[in-house]
């Protein structure tokens, strides 16, 4: 089975830079990944995940400027693009934290509305609606399971993704520096317990007064960190071997020993 080249584009979410300029920079970085198979961007990079006061004004529909720019960049680069997430102004009148996946032809391939909203009684938990659907997407080499940032703390979502066929778990994020230790531990745990690749793209820089952790990571199905970024903006690349998922699950078949919440066979 062919190897998969992934690029995690750890963007600096600098809200002093006007949105059209940030959009153009993100699109240019995606185009520069031509030759990769899959490119991933961070959560809510068009608005800043901790800038909840700006969410209403920044909400876009799925044909708006961010989605259009990302679709064009995916097509120009000929890559699968997980474009991170944006604040979606949905047809039901609600706003969601919505992640978008485009195919190499620039066409929408999947949409995931973040299920677990962060902030307790503030931030996105207050101003956005939560999604309900567990979303996987079949790519030529691997089935992706989609998740967004705070979702990482809820292993039951990842079990559902596993049961829906996920072999690589994408985590688009805006995870603060203060909880970097949680980020690293939870990413490895999700990889180990589901025997899946984890592709985690975080934000860099500081926005709304919250320093971001960076440290985007690729973890293999055995739980080994294959690649890890530092704190500043950078593009992290790695090569995935889809056969490693099958091999790990066959050689160390813990998933076979599940007792609770076993999927029907
Ligand atoms: N954007 C987020 O969901 C932040 C999550 C977070 O900071 C945490 O779980 O810790």
Image: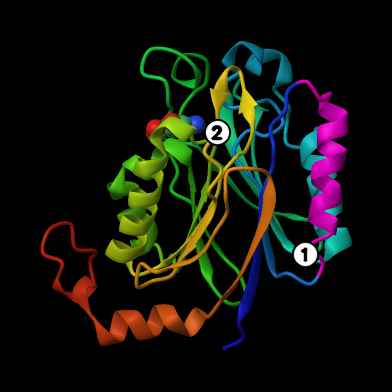
Question: Magenta region's main secondary structure?
Answer: helix
Q: Dividing the picture into quarters, in which one does residue 37 lie?
A: bottom right
Spatial CA distance of label 2 from label 1 is 30 Å
Residue 153, compared with residue 188, is above or below; it is above
Query: Residue 104's mark?
Result: 1
Q: Is residue 32 magenta?
A: yes
Q: Quadrant of ligand 1?
A: top left
Residue, x 29% and y 48% (percent of image)? Answer: 155
Residue 249, compared with residue 165, is above or below; it is below
Comparing labels 2 and 1, the label whose residue is closer to the camera: 2
Numbered range of the magenta stretch:
16-34
Residue, x 34% and y 49% (percent of image)? Answer: 186
Q: Which residue is mark 2?
A: 212
Q: Is residue 27 magenta?
A: yes
Which mark is first along the chain, 1 or 2? 1
Residue 236: give x, y in percent of width and height: 64, 59
Residue, x 24% and y 64% (percent of image)? Answer: 263
Query: Residue 130's mark?
Result: none
Q: Is residue 26 left or right of residue 100?
A: right
SS of the residue under disc 2 = loop
The residue closer to the viewer here, 32 or 167, is 32
Q: Residues within 10 Å of mark 1 (few under 14, many from 20)?
A: many
Is there any visible trace of residue 192 in the rendered image?
A: yes
The residue closer to the viewer here, 30 or 135, is 30
Instruction: Respond yes or no on whether mark 2 lies under 8 Å from ligand 1.
Output: no
């Amino acid at each position: 089975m062919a190897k998969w080249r992934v690029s995690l584009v750890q963007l600096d979410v600098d809200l002093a830079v006007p949105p059209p300029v940030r959009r153009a920079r993100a699109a240019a970085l995606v185009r520069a990944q031509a030759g990769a198979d899959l490119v991933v961007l961070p959560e809510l990079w068009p608005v800043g995940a901790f800038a909840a006061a700006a969410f209403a004004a920044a909400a876009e529909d799925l044909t708006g400027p961010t989605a259009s720019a990302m679709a064009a960049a995916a097509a120009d680069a000929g890559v699968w693009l997980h474009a991170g997430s944006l604040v979606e102004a949905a047809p039901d009148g609600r706003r969601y934290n919505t992640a978008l996946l485009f195919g190499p032809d620039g066409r929408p391939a999947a949409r995931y509305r973040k299920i677990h909203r962060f902030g307790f009684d503030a931030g996105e938990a207050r101003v956005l609606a939560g999604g309900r659907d567990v979303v996987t997407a079949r790519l030529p080499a691997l089935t992706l399971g989609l998740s967004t940032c705070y979702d990482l703390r809820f292993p039951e979502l990842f079990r559902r993704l596993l049961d829906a066929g996920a072999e690589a778990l994408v985590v688009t994020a805006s995870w603060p520096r203060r909880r970097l230790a949680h980020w690293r531990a939870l990413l490895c745990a999700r990889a180990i317990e589901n025997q899946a690749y984890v592709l985690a793209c975080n934000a860099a820089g500081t926005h709304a007064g919250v320093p971001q952790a960076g440290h985007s990571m690729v973890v293999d199905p055995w739980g080994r960190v294959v690649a890890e970024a530092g704190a500043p903006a950078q593009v992290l690349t790695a090569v995935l071997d889809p056969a490693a998922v099958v091999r790990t699950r066959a050689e160390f078949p813990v998933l076979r020993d599940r007792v609770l919440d076993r999927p029907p066979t």
